[in-house]
Image (tube, rainbow, N blue to C red):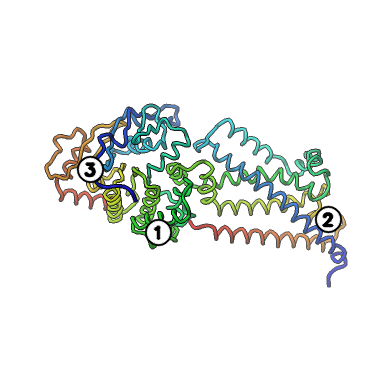
Amino acid sequence: MTWPMNKIQNIHPLIRLEGLSKSFALPDGTRFDAVKNVSLQIREGEIVGLIGKSGAGKSTLLRLINLLERPDAGHVHLGEQELTRLGKTELRAARQGLGMIFQQFNLLQNASVFDNVAFPLKIHGRRSKAEIAARVHACLGIVGLSDKTHSYPAQLSGGQKQRVAIARALAPEPRVLLCDEPTSALDAETTRSVLDTLRDVNLRFGVTIVIVTHELSVVWRLCRQVAVIEDGRLAEQFAIDGSLSDGSALRRTALGRELARIAASPAEAQALERLEAAVA
Amino acid sequence: MISANITAILPELWTAIGQTALMLAIGLGAAVLVGGPLGVLLFLLSPGQSLANRPVFQVLNWLVNTVRSFPFIILLVALVPFTRSIAGTSIGPVAAAVPLSFAAIPYLARLVEQCLREVPRGVIEAAHAMGASELQIVRRVLITEARSGLVLALTVLAISFLSYSAVAGVVGGGGIGDLAIRYGYYRFQTDVMVLTVAILIVLVQGIQFTGNRIARRLDKR
């Protein structure tokens, strides 16, 4: 693995979203504006949480980053590249730099854990069998699943499946990991261990993480930056600095105030976590 | 013990079994080679999929439905000129395999399209997010994930076309069904009729049993 961890942070952001808009056609013929003119910059090595109510457009915004959704307007930059200008083939190559994990894991059910993790390596040729095997074993080691190499997804628990998905996303050595509600299908304890794995990946390899979630406990456990999405717009953006001062007075959105209050009070944070566990 | 009727047709029976096997092999082969890709195309072109293209999808969809609307015996006769130009004759198992293939292609295409719809959307999306091309998604995602359903689809097709091949006997296609009609039906040889039907029953059971076994072995879900 080649990611230096303590590299001097670039002055230029790694991900630059400029004026992104996206609307969808509804069955009744009208259009729904999911994302409205959002600009956002994410520096290398960050962990950014995109939070908001369901239907606020946070998932769509995340899917605009790797162009799973094409924006109606605006630009997406990853490092030096403008993704929105790339042709089909170039975009496929660029997507190796953008790993993604999902709420429903989205593993191949008829492929072994090994073959799932090897998938992104096999589709972008030029690696030998031995190189692929070495990389797959390294990635399964990172997520702590070396003993499950020959299992099939159906034989794994939810948390293990999500870890295989993380290993798969890491295999092509991406700079960014996009996470779409990665813990929403998991119980509280499994959630914690998956979040630990994500933090570990960020610290050890400097992978920038963008995570969409509606669980506030996920945000204060993992994220260092938060962007609150309301009604398709970026309502506010702030850092979670880990200090125990109550910054809620500074926040413009209800979600932001709630998050600041929780971050400032460990007792409340634990209570929230218990509550979210009970609901799940 | 064996009746005189049966002893008399025994040599012909072996030929007939070979002819049926030949018709099925050609028909199913054409279905897999042409109908399979056509089914994949139908799926990829359908609304909401990655190559979604309404006009092309609708044309293909209409074509598949239209060919499937023909009663097989009508198709058999209607295609005689076409069969003659391809097989050089309109009589015999190879000639009968032409309309069989013609009917089997859209049949399998439809079955394949339905199987692929069972593959979860998210898995296809994950492959796109990893930078897979359409062809890689077809081979490594759609076919891998739907493989046990595809084997069962082929099983259904094989059994349907075993009985279609019997109809081909009417126009001199040969095969087990032809034997049943010529001796069992036209000459009132009930024992021959019972024997041929029994052979067909054994074949159908065997095909279904094998198909189920392979499908179960391939299914890791």
Using the image, determine if residue A248 lies above or below residue A126: above
Q: Residue at x 34, y 47 (%)?
A: A182
**Amino acid, disc 2:** Tyr
Q: Mark number for residue A69?
A: none
Which image quadrant is residue B21 in? bottom right
- Which chain is indicated by disc 2? B
Q: Residue at x 59, y 59 (%)?
A: B212
| Residue located beneath label 1 in the image | A156
Measured from the top left, where is residue A189 in percent x and y? 28, 56
| Residue located beneath label 3 in the image | A224
Q: Residues within 10 Å of mark 1 (few under 14, many from 20)?
A: some
Q: CA distance from mark 3 to mark 1?
A: 31 Å
Q: Are marks 3 and 1 on the same chain?
A: yes
Q: CA distance from mark 2 to mark 1?
A: 58 Å
Q: Mark number for residue B185?
A: 2
**Amino acid, disc 1:** Leu
Measured from the top left, where is residue B215 in percent x and y? 57, 57
Residue A87 vs residue B16, the one in the foreground: A87
